[in-house]
Image: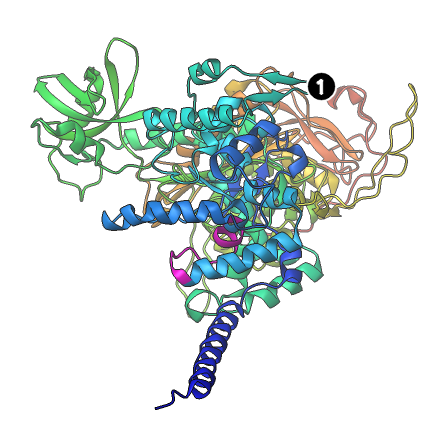
Amino acid sequence: MTIPWKQILIGAGAVFAVILLSVAGFLAWLVHDLPSEKRLAAYEPPITTRVHAGDGALIGEFAEENRVFVPYSDIPEHVVNAFLSAEDRNFFEHGGLDLMAFARAQITNVGRAINGRRLHGASTITQQVAGNMLLNRDYSVTRKVKEAVMAMRVEKTFSKEKILELYLNQIELGDRSFGVAAAALNYFNKPLAEVTLAEAALLAGLPKGPTKWNPKRNPDLAMQRRNLILDLMADNKKLYVVGVDGARVDIPLDKAKAEPIRTVNRFSGSEFAAVGYFTEEIRRLVTQKPDNFLPDDLIAELKSESRKRGPGGRRRTEEEGINDWFNTAGLSIRSTLDTRLQLIARRSLRAGLEDYDRRHGYRGTLGKVSLGTSWQEALRGIKVPADLDQWEKAVVLGVAKSRVEIGLASGAKGQLRAQDVEWAGKTYKRPEDTKKRGLAEGDAVLVQALDKKGQYALKQLPVANGALVALDPHTGRVFAMVGGYSFAQSSFNRATQARRQPGSTFKPFVYAAALDKGFTPASLILDAPVIDCQPGAPCYQPQNYTKDFYGFATMRLGLEQSRNAMTVRLAQEIGLEPVRDMARNLGVVEEMPLFLSAALGSIEATPLAVTAAYASFVNGGKRIEPGFVDRIQDRRGRSIYRRDLRECSGCTESWNAGARAPRLPDDRKQALDPVTAFQIGYMLEGAVTRGTGKIIAALNRPLAGKTGTTDDYRSAWFVGFSPDLVVGVYVGFDDNHTLGDRETGGRAAAPVFKDFMGSALANQPPRPFRTPSGVKFVSIDARTGQLPGPDSRDVISEAFRFGSEPSVFDPAGGIWNYGVTGGDEDQPSAILAPGEAVAEKPPAKPADLGGVY
């Protein structure tokens, strides 16, 4: 029988063709979704967005992958050599695939597969760029095929140097580091250019095991791995560095191996712990209000990208899309933060909250720890916020009367102060809290070391919270902001997100509206009961804090002593519309209900808004917009946002001694009459020297401010200023329950302001407040508001709008004589401030206001 070879060959050819076509089709399907060469050429790696303080110091980073991009030309040669020796010694010889290395790896993989260990892929650097950076990270046959195809495309698209640049900026190196520059910062806190040969070898050893060889976690293993890379570099004759002058310096192998590993915890300092609320506010502003910071074309592009489906097929919101972009865009954000003031702000607010908390007793321990052999491990397992600075967890080991011995997780032992032991035994002041107090063995507590002799102070996390914001009253640049006691415990920013009743800190806006209506600081207002009854509502009858009434008193006294009845009567007489307009013009609120209680601060506002509004009292009545960002640059250094867009004519010209400096145009809105602004500020100086904020007077420098306390002591405020710094402090509970009896703004908030201002202005000479034109200082009787007479006991210098000052003493009246009846208009000027003249024409007397004069 004849064998039909022809038919067999035809059939075999057909089968082979089908197989070939199937394989080709499979490969085509496999790589159909890979990026094209054009898309590869446009590829930009995600880069960390970095936030800097006003002085340029790095204060925060936002990233999905913490990366600092460095161009190939700026990567030190010994860093490149270390990675080539460790990862791909033939990189400059192959075309993307190293078949010999691949074959060696497969032989090794036989044994690894038998032992159930992870297989080696022998990927070249090009394959790692293609696979690890541009594809998913599963380890499968199909992925290796895609990786190989992608590697050849990468080699066709980029130069070898560009591929190395992508690799060295992309590779994961542990400790939240992606790329060699980020790793140099996170491990050594130094720029890449300063990395030593041994440090470069350490970094080069990390790609295959970022966790296993992490020098912070496993220093011994990291040392072994580093020395192995140094041996490989020696084999390749690459043990050298290139100096700044271009000269090659050979490094002996034994010297490189002898270098100890020194790592740092880069973001562990107090300056980083202090800025959490500030940097998060910047992120929130840019991502939630991009129209205020980003160009229109970029916003449109980001919104379009946001509509694409994310993981799982879910469409992202625009905010999510912009936030993802923010974390990968490589922005450089220059903030307004002053690092010195920020540290002072955090310390002052924390101290004030701790003082308040301590006044109300010890609430109890962190929990119980069994005092067996593993108590130290159990103590480490108790969770507390990470930003408690010098506080440590401890366990009570023994109690004997007022002596309490404690042990720390480190094994150290010590004793609590006797006064802290006594404090822990007192009952908390809230009546609903009946828990028995006192410390017992096994109690886990927070402590702070006082000395090296084993003395410790007992601590507890405050339950009340608060905020402090400090800004430039002339520009609105926010120098410092702390939104709570612990950002690690709660990221809710009480400076910008908490809307609370400002209480009496709102009163200056009422008095400012009255001054604009013709009143003066010496106008007499009746301090007596006020009852306001409206149809369908209960009658409103405000009370003074002291439960008494002064009768007729000057407007100054009403503000200094924070008299509620006087303030409501004044608002009743001028009408609530001017008060609303004043608060709206200064940015306190967008709308205000026309109820008399609003005059006492029953409206809601953020501490930032109230503090910014107070800036107008010191800057001549200009409205300022508080700002946290001065400039934003993209990854290429191009400015995409500048806060100050004013043109400076002459700023680029050469300057000669004696020449007048260029002047920038003032584009701030005039929201308040300059004289009115000064008068309010001058009266608030009195509130500090004689009134509810007199605790501040101990600083002995020109300062002004106002306390605020809401009903049932739910919130305590102090907002005040120096000539060039305005500061607001708020203290309260997040659930808005009472702070406790007599916890006023003067007691709970003013000490925080005092502590902050005392440190912030230390070593600065006292500066007086600037007086605008149109102000006339006249000596008056502080009680009557008249010119001083023979029986005047308290004479002060008052600031009047020119032409509104009293001109004649009326011994019988108790109110001013404007020269209409009796008196001598040419009365000697000795009764006025030195050098001041009597008004040529007496001002009109305010209309009869039913008890307000």
Residue 140 located within the stretch drawn in magenta: yes
Viewer-closest of 696 and 313: 313
Which quadrant, please, contains the C terminus? top right
Residue, disc 1:
245
Task: State left or right for residue 230 relative to residue 369.
Answer: right
Amino acid on which the number 1 mark rests in the picture: Asp
Q: Position of residue 391 (x, y in %)?
A: 31, 26
Nearer to us in this view, 320 or 533:
320
Considering every residue shown, the one lying at the far top of the view is 453
- In the displayed orientation, state which residue is furthest to the bottom: 1
Image coords of residue 625 (percent x, y)? 65, 46
Q: Is residue 587 visible?
A: yes
Q: Residue at x 36, y 38 (%)?
A: 211
Place residue 239 in its image quadrant: top right
Q: Residue 154: name its quadrant.
A: bottom right
- Up-down relation of residue 326 to residue 315 (above or below): above
Q: Is residue 122 left or right of residue 163?
A: left
Q: Measuring 22% from the left and 16% from the top, which residue is drawn there?
A: 417
Q: Position of residue 776 (x, y in %)?
A: 76, 30
Q: Residues within 10 Å of mark 1 (few under 14, many from 20)?
A: few
Q: Which residues are magenta?
A: 128-141
Residue 719 in sight in this render = no
Tally of marks: 1
Image position, residue 268 (x, y; %): 42, 29
Report whether 799 appears left or right of 714. right
